[in-house]
Image (tube, helix red, strand yellow):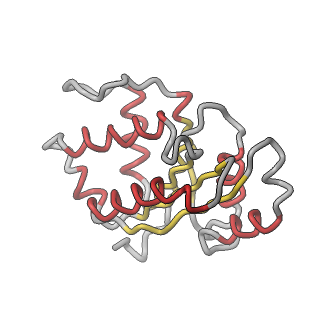
Amino acid sequence: MLDPVRSRSFAFILGSPRGGGNTETLARYAAEGLPPDATDSWLSLSELTLPPSPAGPLLNSAEKVLLDATLDSTDIVVASPLHWYSVSAATKLYLDYWARWSGLPDLGFREQMRGKNLWAVTAYARGDETDTQPLTGMFRRTAEYLGMEWCGALLARAHREGDLEADQAALARAVAFFGGDR
C-alpha cells in the first residue's frame, strides 16, 4: 500500500501515435480532478525513441526517462486509444519494457512497483464498452502480477475530434475519475 504521508504523484503515459487526440483529451480532463496535493507529469510515447526490442545491458535515454517516471510515481496512468481491442503499439512496447525491467536483478522493479496504483484511460471509436475488455483485463492482470492496485479504467466513445467535448457525461466521469477536486 502507498505511504499515506507521501503526497501522490501521477505519471501520465500517453500511448497515442498523435498528440491531442481523444484519449489524451480524456486524460487531461481527468487530471483536472486530481487530489489537490497531487503532482502530475506527462510523457508521450510517440516523442520517445525506444528500440523495438527491449534488450541489452544499458538503458538508453528514452528508456531511462520512462523508467524514472514509472518508479518515481505513486500512480501510473496509461492513456492509450483502443487499437484492435487492446492498447496501441507504443503502449505495448512500454509494457514490454516493464518485463525487461523486471528481469534486471539490481533494479528490484517488481518490489518497487508493489503498492503503486495503476489506472487506464482510453477512447474507443466503435462498438461499446465490452470491446475494451481485453485492454482493461490486461491492465488488471498486470497490476495483480506486480502487486499493484488496479484502480480501473476511464472509458469514453469518441470517433472524431470534438466528439468527446460534446459528451458531457463522459467529461463529468473524467473529472471525477481520480476522486479529488483541484
Q: Quadrant of residue 138?
A: bottom left
Q: Nearer the viewer, residue 74 or 177?
A: 177
Q: Does 182 sit above or below residue 57?
A: below
> Could you tell whether 167 is left or right of 94 in the image?
right
> Could you tell whether 109 is left or right of 169 in the image?
left
Residue located 42% across and 77% down the image: 4
Residue located 13% across and 43% down the image: 105
Residue 102 placement (x, y as % from top left): 22, 46
Q: Residue furthest left?
A: 105
Residue 13 placement (x, y as % from top left): 52, 45
Quadrant placement of the N terminus: bottom left
Residue located 46% across and 55% down the image: 76
Q: How many marks?
A: 0
> Could you tell whether 140 is left or right of 107 in the image?
right
Residue 85 placement (x, y as % from top left): 51, 48
Residue located 31% across and 44% down the image: 98
Q: Does 94 sit above or below residue 75?
A: above
Q: Quadrant of residue 14?
A: top right
Q: Does 167 sit above or below residue 92?
A: below
Quadrant placement of the C terminus: bottom right
Q: Nearer the viewer, residue 144 or 30?
A: 144
Residue 146 placement (x, y as % from top left): 27, 59
Q: Nearer the viewer, residue 74 or 53?
A: 53
> Could you tell whether 38 is left or right of 157 in the image?
left
Q: Residue furthest front?
A: 127
